[in-house]
Image: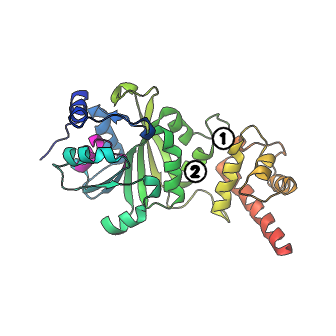
Amino acid sequence: MPKPYLANPAGCRKVLDRYGFSFRKKFGQNFLIREQVLEDIISTAGIGKDDFVLEIGPGIGTLTQYLAESAGRVCAVEIDRALLPILEDTLSDWDNVTVLNADILKTDIQEIADRENEGRPVKIVANLPYYITTPILMGLFEGGAPFSDLTVMVQKEVAERMVTGPGSKNYGALSLAVSYYTEPEISFLVGPECFMPRPKVDSAVVHMVRRDVPPVSVRDEKLLFDLIRASFNERRKTLQNGIANYAGFSFSKEEALRAIEACGFKPTVRGEALSLSEFGRLADELCLIRGQRNRQD
């Protein structure tokens, strides 16, 4: 039975030198080189032989080897074509891995689940590029990706943003999206010394279990998330101004104020003060106002 062999500086460097690979900053490449961290990721994700795992950004295949050893099947989505011959080499001992050269933001995960997992939800595991963490997560959430849980390595500051609540300086659109779709938990922290090359920040592994139903029920889910974006696009402005200025809306300042006051909020309230359930109430009020306006037109 093959064993993972890349989870150390020497193993990683040997493969990189063999292929003359140069790290590409635009892809945010930092490869894990600490065996214990990789074992902890597998444990946190609860990977077993019955699981189909989608890995985002396998790099040279360090985490992929551990996933292949533990899971039934693995599909690794890698955007960098320069890594394909390396992955073909490092994953050659495992016959349960498929590498897909694609941009995860443009990948139809439902199609992969239908083809590879009989349409059942997949487990998603990733060491996410820090510069594109939020677009990837929001794409998975709003794109309706069929996942049962997500286990992701992200920048520590982003991890804290994902699990925080109203009133915190880290609270924002990502916090609300994560709590709407999943039950998140920071599993453990990871220092810069665990990567090659070393990042300038600490990292954290976050485990998110998909909710069967969202914690709030709203009339229009798209309107809810447009409202959340409007609220945090310009954090220093009041919620009333954020709604009126948001390009995706057609609400006037007067309509925004009417909805805010109908919810019992102060006219000067800012988005960072509202909980998910309060955003839900406000979204429903705006939905009613829009409906009344449309009927009058």
Q: Which residue: 53% across, 55% down?
A: 181
Front-most of 95 and 37? 95
Residue 40 among those drawn in magenta: no
Q: Which of marks 2 and 1 is nearer the N terminus?
A: 1
Q: In this view, does 160 lie above or below 150?
A: above
The residue stretch that appears in magenta: 56-68
Rendered image quadrant of residue 161: top right
- Say few, some or many: other residues with alpha carbon within 10 Å of mark 2 (under 14 / 14 to 19 / 20 or more): some
Which numbered dot is residue 198? Answer: none
Task: Identify which amino acid the numbered label 2 is placed on.
Answer: Ala
Rendered image quadrant of residue 254: bottom right
Q: Which residue: 25% across, 28% down?
A: 9
Q: Which residue: 49% across, 46% down?
A: 184
Residue 149 visible in image: yes
Spatial separation of the CA atoms under disc 2 and disc 1: 13 Å
Rendered image quadrant of residue 167: top right
Residue 117 visible in image: no
Front-most of 74 and 103? 103
Q: Name the residue under label 2.
A: 177
Task: Identify which amino acid the numbered label 1 is placed on.
Answer: Pro
Q: Do the residues labelled 2 and 1 touch (CB within 8 Å)?
A: no
Query: If the image is split into quadrants, where does the C terminus sit?
Result: bottom right
Which numbered dot is residue 166? Answer: 1
Percent from the top left, x then y, of residue 208?
A: 46, 48
- Say few, some or many: other residues with alpha carbon within 10 Å of mark 1 (under 14 / 14 to 19 / 20 or more): some
In the image: residue 9, left or right of residue 146: left
Q: Residue furthest left?
A: 1
Tag in front: 2 or 1: 2
Numbered disc 2: secondary structure: helix
Q: Which residue: 29% across, 31% down?
A: 34
Percent from the top left, x then y, of residue 12?
A: 25, 33
In the image: residue 52, left or right of residue 249: left
